[in-house]
Image (spheres, grey):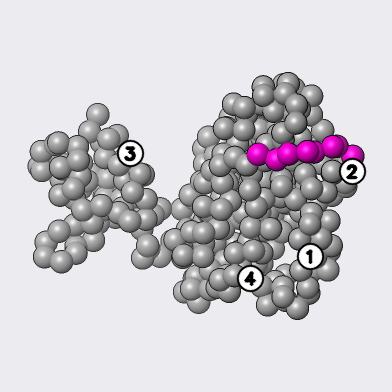
Amino acid sequence: MLENKILKLLEDVKYEGILQSEIVKKLKASKSRVSEILKILENHGVIVRNIEAGKSYRVWLTRYYPHGDRLRVGILKSTEYSVLISAVDADFIVYENAIDLTRDLIMNRVDLAASPLITQVLFGIMMKNIRIFDVVAENGSGIVFGEGKGSFGTSEMSAMEINLKAVRDEIPIKQVEYYSSPEKMIEDLSRLEGIAIWEPYISMIEKEKVYFKEIIGDTPCCTIAVNEIAIKKKEEMINELLDKLRKCRIDFKKVSNVLGFNEKLTKNSIKNYNFNPDYSLDEIIRYLKRGGIDLSRESLVKLFENL
């Protein structure tokens, strides 16, 4: 079906968009049919078209349009974001890994990102154009044991990586392998000694497992960070979102639709999270240090000035 092919192409190009004439060429479709479909999608708010030099249209999926007036929220594929998803009417963009997500926040491709604390701290210190506002949740992750020996899988620059380092005294971890998506980690579980993974994946896997909370106590997962351009342009929407986070009830249907998990799994997995916990900057510094990241308070004060 041509409409599905167009949507797939627009998903592939993401924030760059694509000229309407290129859609015709790449899909080997008629100009009139492509134009007809794009008009329908535009009328339904699925896409945005802008005229560039001459009479050429550049086309984006609405959630990737760089100049829109809606809030663009980047998240990972995790039920940790159930409250955030429920709290706001926004364009949610779901990522496979924290590095890509936080990079897009730095580049102002998303206004707000909920991604691992450590990822935001390291990017924020380097680039100095984001601010961290709140902790999304704590806990909700652990180790699922595999059939192999020697290596543990995890995601790079993540809460999983920090937590693995923090449990080295209790669980001997000789080697770590990094993965760009949870699905790829799960595929390799049979040859790994274990994987550090989050909800709802940890609930989905019928293997021996242990939650990090059981070994090292409560730990923060992801934080909410906002690009400074968005703070200036969309301050009212951002403040409204942050206010709703403390009051919102979870809309399981919406969460399931955004993340692509069924409602039963969503409901079961969120029991392992504590949403909107309160953390001081000093507590965050101690948590980072336990995971091998030793940073001074002075280096973090401005980044966390809203916490």
Q: Which residue corresponds to mark 2?
A: 169
Q: Is residue 62 left or right of residue 74?
A: left
Of labels 3 and 2, earlier in sequence is 3
Kindly check if marks 2 and 1 are in contact, taking CB atoms under 8 A apart as contact: no
Look at label 4 and name its amino acid. Answer: Ile
Report the quarter where the C terminus lies: bottom right
Neighbour tally class for label 3: few under 14, some 14-19, many 20 plus, Cα within 10 Å? few
Q: Which residue corresponds to mark 4?
A: 125
Q: Nearer the viewer, mark 4 or mark 3?
A: 4
Spatial CA span between label 3 and label 1:
43 Å
Of labels 4 and 2, earlier in sequence is 4
Spatial CA span between label 4 and label 2:
29 Å
Spatial CA span between label 3 and label 2:
46 Å
Neighbour tally class for label 4: few under 14, some 14-19, many 20 plus, Cα within 10 Å? some
Q: Residue 8 bears which disc, if any?
A: 3
What is the magenta range? 170-177
Vertical placement of residue 7 versus 55, above or below: above
Secondary structure beneath label 2: loop
